Image: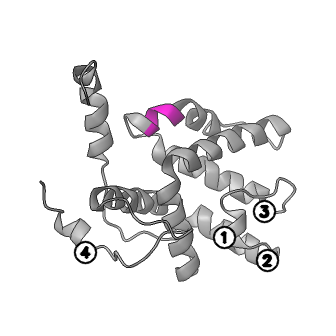
Amino acid sequence: RRQPSAFCAALPWAIQPLGGESMASSSTSCRDYGLQQRIAGSCGAEVTAFMRCCDASDLTFRDAFPSPPSSSPCAPAHQAVARCVAQALSSGRGGAYDSCARDFAAAQCEGLGDTEASAVVFRRSWACAWRDFGAPLKMLLVTSEAMGECRSSGVPFRDTETANEAKFRGAWAGTAL
């Protein structure tokens, strides 16, 4: 059994994710923390702008971040967050990255105006992000709320676990794994 790296060992394990669910394992938690840091590094300005819009509009950031009301004055700011998250997560390979690739690519298209069709594109991309990357997004929500802004620690992260899974999936076909 592999020992966690110094990076993983230094994480604040006492922090519980949103909703009170327990963290599955140290490697999953480390991956989620790394992805949260990647998203925060890429999308910190967008998340902070959305948070401030929620404060100005009397919306609760905790409620509006996962599923904002479509008629909200902060909908354009949330679409900017969805586009940025799609861009930040589109560089990964394997598993969840591949299942969201089409929706993430659609959300990154330039020229998506303020139409109902573009709102559908952003909702699909955001739903995919929450389905497959919910834990890192919940961590992002909680830490942003606690700090009053969204920013990363500046530590680079590369998700090699999911990439390796994609690389060797063909070799595992037909096995008990």
Label 3 sits on a secondary structure element that is: loop
Residue 106 x, y percent position in the rendering: 63, 33
Reading the image, the residue beneath label 2 is 56
Q: CA distance from mark 4 to mark 3?
A: 36 Å
Relative horizontal placement of residue 167, taking residue 69 as reference (left or right): left
Q: Are marks 1 and 3 in contact (CB under 8 Å)?
A: no
Q: Earlier in the sequence, mark 2 or mark 3?
A: 2
Question: Is there any visible trace of residue 3 in the rendered image?
Answer: yes
Query: Looking at the figure, which quarter contains the C terminus?
Result: top left
Q: Earlier in the sequence, mark 2 or mark 4?
A: 4
Give the residues in magenta: 96-100
Reading the image, the residue beneath label 4 is 10
Classify 163 as above or below 73. Answer: above
Give the numbered dot on residue 62.
1
Q: CA distance from mark 2 to mark 3?
A: 9 Å
Relative horizontal placement of residue 109, taking residue 176 as reference (left or right): right
Rendered residue at 64%/45% (across/down): 127
Q: Earlier in the sequence, mark 1 or mark 3?
A: 1
Question: Is there any visible trace of residue 112 in the rendered image?
Answer: no
Q: CA distance from mark 1 to mark 4?
A: 26 Å
- The extreme right residue here reads 71
Rendered residue at 35%/67% (across/down): 154
Label 1 sits on a secondary structure element that is: helix
Residue 111 x, y percent position in the rendering: 72, 36
Classify residue 11 by image quadrant.
bottom left
Q: CA distance from mark 2 to mark 4?
A: 36 Å
Q: Earlier in the sequence, mark 1 or mark 4?
A: 4
Reading the image, the residue beneath label 3 is 74
Q: Does 64 appear in magenta?
A: no
Would you call the spot at circle 2 few (<14 residues within 10 Å), some (14-19), or many (20 or more)? few
Label 2 sits on a secondary structure element that is: helix
